[in-house]
Image (cartoon, rainbow, N blue to C red):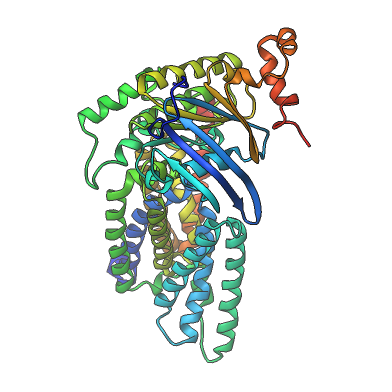
Amino acid sequence: MGGGSSLMNSDIAVLLDHVWVRYNSSVILEDIILHVRREEIVSIVGPNGSGKTTLLKTIIGFTKPFRGRVEVLGTSPEKVKNTGRIGYLAQSSQYDANFPVSVFDVVAMTRYSQKGFFETLSGSDRKLIDAQLDKVEMGDFSEQHFGSLSGGQKQRVLIARALALKPEILILDEPSTGLDSVAQDTFYHMLVRLRDEEHLTIIMVSHDIGGVSTVVDTVACLKKKIHFHGKPSECIPTEALARVFGKDVYFLKHDKNCETCRDE
Amino acid sequence: MELFGLSFFQNALIMSILLSFLFGVLSFFIVMRKMSFLGAGIAHTAFGGVALGIFLNINPFVSALVFCILTALLIDRLVQRGRISFDTGIGIFFAFSMALGALLISLKKDYTFDLMGYLFGNILGVTVIDTVMAGIALILFSLFIIIFLHRILFMSFDEEGAMVSGVRTEFLGTLLLVFLASIIVISIKMVGIILVSALVVLPASFGVLISRDFRKVIFWGIVYTLVIMVGGLFLSYYLDTPVGATSVTAGTLIYFIGFLISRVHSRA
């Protein structure tokens, strides 16, 4: 877990080696080099339009680089894409609040995706689904309409849905959007607990880094290129700022002073 | 009732029932996937397909079926590749097919074309063959839904999440489009090009007013479509009005009444 062990290949969950991605004719990602160790929590930070979502989609295999090599769990993203070894949560705004499904239905989706054509959920499937909901402290909400939940609760349910496939990597796009700072804190600590209990590698994206920096192992600052990837503490430019602004210095730093996040 | 002795009425009644099941279920997935506009687009594309068949002296049903399926798949591919946006793609083909249809029919000067019938439906035109086609479509579509219900539900809710979880989203999405195009073409004689898009949108929209459970939404979508299709058929017979127009007008009124009731209900 981010310890001092040597960089052995089996220790690496995701590897991007000089990766270039373009959309239509414009280059979105430029010469990306990124190593994510197993059971590491990485936060990718950067302003809007810096290529964060594209980076996630490249790791998942939705977007193909035109140059460079991507390796996920020791193989290519294409081979991992349809296996459920990666759990992916899109930005929460992508989920239709009126979609007529209960919390249980949502988690059941991944179970059904592994079933044969005429199979239905078995008793053990139902138990497994309930257990995933308990893991994210949503066990009491099983019968509720998914759309009626708060943003943070929805995220938890979607994580439970991913967990039902026993993934090795969890990828989250802006999971903190719409959460107040208390809810964010609780959410991040739940991620840490899940990482430890489920042996997950967690890669998430956010446009701020306020609460994230207290729980993540590493931060990658992205704006077309990876400008920095290391422990959050290394990113602090001056200790003076920290003394003046306390914990919020991370936010300030990434918003104003970080080379990556600074507007041109 | 003497009505039932009339063979065209029997055909129309059987057709209404079959179409109610088809659209009751289809509507759910199309509305949830936000593809209602594609339904309208494909329906209008059918006009070009029908005219093409008349112009080339081939069966207009076959030409419309092929034309609509190909257009639906073409729009889908262009959108998937990020070449054009969804509504631009539909907007272009929509207008092009109508124009092409009008052009081809005007070139075929000796042909008397029942334009109103194609636009608004004509139950006199519904034959036994049409009902057999609808029956086959219902069997195939039911099989498709029974086998893939939960996978299609998953990808309708979250396409990327479904893909990551091993759902063959591209394959299922393509099949759903083929069904959408085929069901629309099959229904055109009965309800017409203009009004078929209402059958794509209304059933699920009504179902959502009643329940937040997808099983019940689909069930009420079917019940609703049965009421407006079969009710509309009898009403149109007694009022001597076009059946598609009658069904859709009644259906929209029922939808708005349901909408108002659900609003009052949720406030109480």
Q: In which quarter of the image is residue A44?
A: top right
Q: Residue at (50%, 66%) from the top-left corner?
A: B74
Q: Where is residue A213 in the image (x, y as percent from the top left)?
A: 59, 19
Examine the rendering and report whether any part of residue A138 can be seen.
no
Q: In this view, does B228 lie above or below A197?
A: below
Q: Residue at (33%, 57%) from the top-left corner?
A: B17
- Which residue occupies the foreground of this view, A202 or B30? A202
Q: Residue at (59%, 62%) from the top-left corner?
A: B89
Q: Where is residue A153 in the image (x, y as percent from the top left)?
A: 48, 23
Q: Where is residue A28 in the image (x, y as percent from the top left)?
A: 63, 46
- Which residue occupies the foreground of this view, B219 or A19? A19
- Which residue occupies the foreground of this view, A263 or A34? A34
Residue extending furthest toward the bottom: B110
Q: Residue at (55%, 83%) from the top-left corner?
A: B105
Q: Position of residue A122 (x, y in %)?
A: 21, 33
- Which residue occupies the foreground of this view, B106 or A161? A161
Q: In this view, does B75 lie above or below B258?
A: below
Examine the rendering and report whether any part of residue A58 can be seen.
yes
Q: In which quarter of the image is residue A184?
A: top right
Q: Is residue B245 above or below residue B162?
A: below
Quadrant in which the N terminus of chain B appears: bottom left
Q: In which quarter of the image is residue A129?
A: top left
Residue extending furthest toward the front: A6
On the picture, is A13 further left or further right than B245? left
On the picture, is A188 further left or further right than B154? right
On the picture, is A122 further left or further right than B115? left
Residue extending furthest toward the top: A243
